[in-house]
Amino acid sequence: MQLSREELIHAYRQMRTIRAFEDRVHEEFAAGNIPGFVHLYAGEEASAVGFCMHLTDVDRIASTHRGHGHCIAKGCDVKAMMAEIFGKKDGLCGGKGGSMHIADLEKGMMGANGIVGGGPPLICGAALTAKTLGTGGVAIAFVGDGGSNQGTTLESYNLAKVWNLPAIFVIEDNGYAESTASSWSVAGSQVGRAAGFGMPGYEVDGHDFFAVHEVAREVIDRARKGGGPSLVHVRFTRYYGHFEGDAMTYRGKDEVPRIAAERDCLKLFRQRVVEAALLEPETLDAIDREVVAYIDRVTNEAKAAPMPTEADLLTDVYVSYH
Amino acid sequence: MQLSREELIHAYRQMRTIRAFEDRVHEEFAAGNIPGFVHLYAGEEASAVGFCMHLTDVDRIASTHRGHGHCIAKGCDVKAMMAEIFGKKDGLCGGKGGSMHIADLEKGMMGANGIVGGGPPLICGAALTAKTLGTGGVAIAFVGDGGSNQGTTLESYNLAKVWNLPAIFVIEDNGYAESTASSWSVAGSQVGRAAGFGMPGYEVDGHDFFAVHEVAREVIDRARKGGGPSLVHVRFTRYYGHFEGDAMTYRGKDEVPRIAAERDCLKLFRQRVVEAALLEPETLDAIDREVVAYIDRVTNEAKAAPMPTEADLLTDVYVSYH
Amino acid sequence: MPKKTYRQAINEALRQEMERDPRVILMGEDVAGGMGSPGEDDAWGGPLGVTKGLMPRFGRERVLDTPITESAFIGAAVGAAATGLRPVAELMFVDFFGVCFDQIFNQAAKFRYMFGGKAKTPVVIRTMYGAGFRAASQHSQCLYPIFTHIPGLKVALPSNAYEAKGLLIQAIRDDDPVIFFEHKAMYDEEAEVPDEPYVIPFGEANLTREGDDVTVVAMGRMVNFANQVADKLAKEKIGVTVVDIRTTSPLDTETILETASETGRVVVVDESHPRCSMASDIAALVAQECFSDLKAPVKMVTAPHAPVPFSPALEDLYIPSPAKIEAAVREVLAFKG
Amino acid sequence: MPKKTYRQAINEALRQEMERDPRVILMGEDVAGGMGSPGEDDAWGGPLGVTKGLMPRFGRERVLDTPITESAFIGAAVGAAATGLRPVAELMFVDFFGVCFDQIFNQAAKFRYMFGGKAKTPVVIRTMYGAGFRAASQHSQCLYPIFTHIPGLKVALPSNAYEAKGLLIQAIRDDDPVIFFEHKAMYDEEAEVPDEPYVIPFGEANLTREGDDVTVVAMGRMVNFANQVADKLAKEKIGVTVVDIRTTSPLDTETILETASETGRVVVVDESHPRCSMASDIAALVAQECFSDLKAPVKMVTAPHAPVPFSPALEDLYIPSPAKIEAAVREVLAFKG
Ligand SMILES: Cc1ncc(C[n+]2csc(CCOP(=O)(O)OP(=O)(O)O)c2C)c(N)n1
Ligand SMILES: Cc1ncc(C[n+]2csc(CCOP(=O)(O)OP(=O)(O)O)c2C)c(N)n1
Ligand SMILES: [Mg+2]
Ligand SMILES: [Mg+2]
């Protein structure tokens, strides 16, 4: 199905925003301005955006430790996200969560997650809510290739199928879990596992936004119509280290530059829409400039923003406790 | 491959011993002589014996809450087992374990297990020991249909494959997990899951000792030769309730009597060996009588045996603790 | 007032809350039972029949049987709670928490804090605990000290049928994650239980006995044992105050400290292992806060630092018994300093 | 004596034990790293480089990378230990115990007891704990009180590089399951560490400072903070005894009680949450056993009953700091009764 001009612009802007966000976080981390464990999504943008473009706030997603892209794609406030990563009081989570725990339940974003495999069970719950309340919503768990082996993930396949939930499992296979190759750690295949649990399974090139978007439409439609869960195996690469600070010595020489040159999702998108005369290079250039300026602004604001204070330390442990 | 006369007699005696053991425990429980949670293996004997006949003490198995059959098949002392179930001091575990925790590590029996899915990770470890020390041993996890969904089990498939372990996963599908049918709780199929994890998978009629024995030979041979893990899906039924005390109202009318009449593993075995003139009915009858007398004796001895005392309460928490 | 068993009280609380609020759902292994099987539907109602009858009343859409995958379904309950339902999930035995604790302590318990107050996770996890059933090491543990240790969780331990109903209704209406501990040896015990719904607020201890000589702080089944001891000693004119703390988190420190100060002699009874336990938690509290009022060292009565043995002969020696509680009470009374 | 970091000391202990005993193997996520990847082998040595260099020395057969399946590989370590190996498994962050605790607390910890003394499970689980890394709620917890609660487990918390080497060698040679807690903020801290292997026995506390006025009982990183306070107060002629308990299970109650009786004033410092914690465990112990010797209530210094916050501004307020310890010491010293 053809995307409208607005949709194309939206998709490109979202992917570009994620990229610019991650590039900037990378710089700020390297400069010593951001503390903690930070995992960047650069290179993987087509997945978050390709799926989330089909969703509204009634639909829920659960993310991973590598969550910035999913957050942005699901509509989290980018400025508040940046403030969160800097640990500021007006961060999306008041500075209490940080990069690994950005969430916005109102937007249907159930949280980045520090626990590999933490999301799939939660997404079964969100899908159950949708089914029980008849909201028509779906729920998507994004899971890494490493996370695809975790028992919590595999159990969730079974539960989603047995309960016939509107749940979708997106295995974001960037080739590595930390320094361990997915070709080694994942026995069998993702699509084969889906079949083993009686679910439709798809493999898709994650550099190709249009391919992702198309598969996403199909599995989301199926789930919305009561057709149950599906699994999508998205393949691509990550550009930065596992976490910021990782020297990536385990990677092949030129592995990243080659993929970035030949298969970058933003480049491929641009090529496709320009060749097909769907968008003009100037339109895309303008988005690029706007986005970079925007990220620059929110970063500067985040840096200038105040820290939380002692008064915040013990709030929100419970709704109420006595 | 043809079994020798001795092997046939051994197989029949083992299966008959398990049956007689379970029938007697059933009676004793009903009479109020045995406390706790007791899960009986009657009807499933061909699986434990069909696999364990290929094993020696260097090979290890891990069992489930329904462990008596595996213990007997793996060579645990039957008298000490019965004493254990009665909670006696000279029980196989000094009365501290009971029905759900019978173990004999010297025999390669790593324990019945109160935790569904507890065994498969342990078996990966036993297989790793065999591989690391080059013992030529294999390790088998027996798992119920309900346990086949547990994340610990599914993770173990992956680990066993990735590490290329001499491990075998035997899914003992008796149609139910408690009152829940496996046709409902298991999405996809066991063999399909094996394929999803890149393992050979087999389905076998668990009433047919010879079929189980043949598949067991193949997967155990493969594992011994360094060919890695396999999965075997064994189908049969259990004759008694989930635990002793279960009224089994969830079962179909005549479900158990029909299977017991038509597909009982002992009857099928007898039919087969008698028809093929491999063993004489009198030989089998003699075994039946011997076994029943033996079980009667060990039961009476177990009943008469002394209980552990306060001096035993705090021993063996640690090898040493100070 | 009508007499009801602990089992019936729990069943009634669930039924009434499900009637009141359509967002309340149940899930767990065989909470109804009979899924996919040819015989009776609602065949089990949990292994001890606690949820029996709820599925026929509310349907399979609100009483959900699950595969044996605690991470997936406890996590699903957490995820459902965070998105608008009020699930009551059954972790059949608390001993199984080791296969699913992440969804409880890293997810449910931390969402609100990590997300800066923007999440609400009103999930209840009902679970069986305790020894005395000849269920051996992996089906007899207490483990509530572990849940109590975790900020973000609330932990309730009803000591009888009346408490069970009121605390469970509170748990379901509570906006925070609550772990609800049911003692498996108490399901057949009866108490007077009103037919209408009522709540017992969390963090408010209950004085089940009052006396001037010694304070026994207890929880769960141990409250009954403490009551027995108090009744026995009353005949000797020894006055025992028994404090049923009802919830270990939040803990009603005020009532504990007040009664402890009054008597100056305190025994804490906790069915769990001694190390980092509720017994040590309360003993430390009392020793610190009532330092000048204490006439004797606080005494802890707990299970030993050992797994629960199977053999009835050993298990009976293992459990903190009324006799052990009585001995402890006499010991603190006899202390002369 | 040569100076080595906490990281180097741990690495050296592992190397020397692997040299000594071929049954010692390592496993964990990226303990070597680079499995199946085109670049450098042994690329990581764990996320903070603690096991770096061991795979090239001992080969992939003894240093095993694993998929991210803690239940499977921790369970495999347990199963391997029960069948003849002496595995050291790495649970990268203790915060991940919720996906694999069953294999630790229901399997490894209970085998020996449940099986009537016939099993031996010499597994070591190395794990990172503690706050201060800006790692937020799911990567900063302590959780050792939970492991301490479980009979059958031993729990070690080395407070510096010297301790780390000696305790880890003991852990590996120990025939019981040991959980070995490494504080992530200490890997770069140096101490004098002998080149040759040595063991520090479990259950023997160490007096890192001696003084007559007050006893501070601490563990892990908190020992360093306590030492700082002792050194500072020494200048004011306030004598502080610091007890590094080294292992929470077994616990050297004797040394704790002896020093507590001597000074009569005790502060317990525990980085974990306060409820059912090591602080309350030790406070309860001291209050009971030194009742007549105490001149002031025992004082606990712990993290609050709240998850660990991300923001550096909050995390710094969250951690039990030397300043908080000092304040507590002054408070117990000032107590007049
Ligand atoms: C349960 C658990 N185990 C281990 C970790 C440590 N860890 C964080 S990210 C990661 C690798 C995840 O790999 P993958 O799922 O492929 O996601 P990617 O980082 O490639 O996006 C690991 C091992 C964790 N956070 N949680
Ligand atoms: C982790 C865990 N969850 C639940 C249980 C309770 N339980 C014991 S046996 C059982 C059913 C197991 O079914 P299956 O695996 O098919 O084995 P079967 O009883 O049929 O032999 C359940 C739910 C348990 N012991 N452990
Ligand atoms: Mg990956
Ligand atoms: Mg079954």
Image (cartoon, coloured by chain):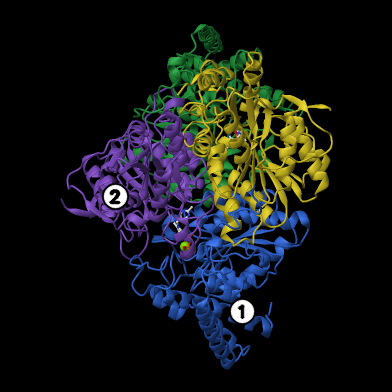
Chain colours: A blue, B green, C yellow, D purple
Please state the horizontal and vertical placement of residue A247, each as a whole percent of the image: 34, 68
Q: Residue B105 is drawn in which quadrant?
A: top left
- Dot 2 alpha-carbon crowd within 10 angstroms: few under 14, some 14 to 19, many 20 or more: many
Mark 2: secondary structure = loop
The relative height of residue B312 versus residue B301 in the rendered view (above or below) is below
Residue B153 seen in render: yes
Location of residue A103 (image quadrant): bottom right
Q: Horizontal and vertical percent for residue B310?
A: 46, 15
In x, y percent, where is residue C297? 48, 28
- Please identify, in this view, whether the residue under mark 2 or under mark 1 is nearer the observer: 2
Label 1, residues with CA under 10 Å away: few <14, some 14-19, many ≥20: many
Q: Residue at x 35, y 52 (%)?
A: D225
Q: Is residue C45 visible?
A: no
Badge 2 vs badge 1, beta-carbon distance below 8 Å:
no
> Above or below — where is D5 with respect to B313?
below
Q: Residue at x 73, y 43 (%)?
A: C170
Q: Which mark is residue B113?
A: none
**Disc 1 sits on a residue from what chain?**
A
Q: Is residue C232 left or right of residue D25?
A: right
Find the residue positioned furthest to the left: D1
Q: Give residue A11's mark.
A: 1
Do marks 2 and 1 both belong to one polypeptide chain?
no
In the rendered structure, the answer to whether residue D235 lies left or right of residue D119 reads left
What kind of residue is marked 1?
A: Ala
Task: Point out the quarter of the image occupied by ligand 2.
Answer: top right
Numbered marks: total: 2
Q: What's the residue at 56%, 45% (across, down)?
A: C100
Where residue D157 sits in the image (x, y, percent)?
A: 35, 44
Indicate the amino acid at tag 2. Answer: Asn
Residue under label 2, please give it: D160
Q: Secondary structure at mark 1?
A: helix
